[in-house]
Image (cartoon, coloured by chain):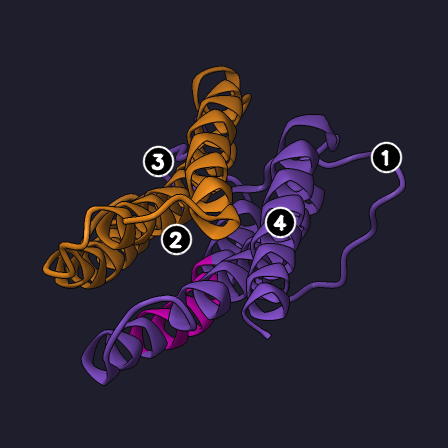
Amino acid sequence: MERTIVTFSLEAVFLGLVILSFMSLYRIIWGPHASDRIVGTNVVMTNVILAIIILAHLFHNYTYLDVAFVYTLSAFVGSLCVLKSLSKGRLS
Amino acid sequence: MKLLMELVVCFLLWSGMFFLFVGTLGLIRLPDIYTRMHATSKCDTLGTGLILLALMTQVGGYNEVVKLVMIGAFIWTINPLVTHAIGSTAYIRGEDHTAETFFKDCYDLPYPGKDVTGKEDIRA
């Protein structure tokens, strides 16, 4: 793959996504309440999806788009389960 | 023409990155859970849409574009839904907010900060 300005921008955006995930790790670790931690994990979820797609494009291996798809749905189900358990005190 | 296309793609990528950065900055800096939720939800949805739009012009065939459109549609429906669930959870649990915030009574909660039967304390 030849080096163009788009390739450089994609690599820089990938690096930026990793840095933004570490920035929101502050809110996950030191968040005063449980809901703050869930907001932080939601941000990390979105960043990881974008990072998977960008790496799939950079490595020319588009099988990983399916991985990103499944990751979206499973993260959605996971955060909804945690929220239900937090608001009702049980999962049923 | 090729250079113009590359510049447009770079503009989309960097503006999406800007919105994601502003959302994370709001997550770190803002004072309570409702404002943090407001910042991250809108900025993340817009930034994800812009970066996915830039990637749709770069991947090769129609299969990949269709998959990217599906991922974008799912994120655009899932993100506001989870945000609404977070907001109602924070309201039901009765978490702190800043002094200027006021609420209307959205749900009829008999015991705020406890579970529905009023016995267990579900606050963290």
Do residues under tags 1 and 3 come within 8 Å of each other at their CB atoms?
A: no
Q: Position of residue B93 (x, y in %)?
A: 51, 43
Q: Which residues are magenta?
A: B70-82
Residue at 21% x, 63% y: name it: A69
Residue B62 location (% of width, % of height):
24, 84
Are discs 1 and 2 less than 8 Å apart at CB?
no
Q: Mark 1 sits on what residue?
A: B99
Task: Quickly name the residue at label 3.
Answer: B120
Instruction: Classify residue B94 by image quadrant.
Output: top right
**What is the spatial separation of the Cα atoms under label 4 and label 3, in whole angstroms?**
48 Å
Q: Colour of chain B?
A: purple
The chain holding disc 1 is B
Contact flag, marks 3 and 2 (Cβ < 8 Å): no
Task: Measure how far apart labels 3 and 2 are at the Cα level.
Answer: 9 Å
Q: Is residue B54 left or right of residue B56?
A: right
The amino acid pointed to by label 4 is Trp
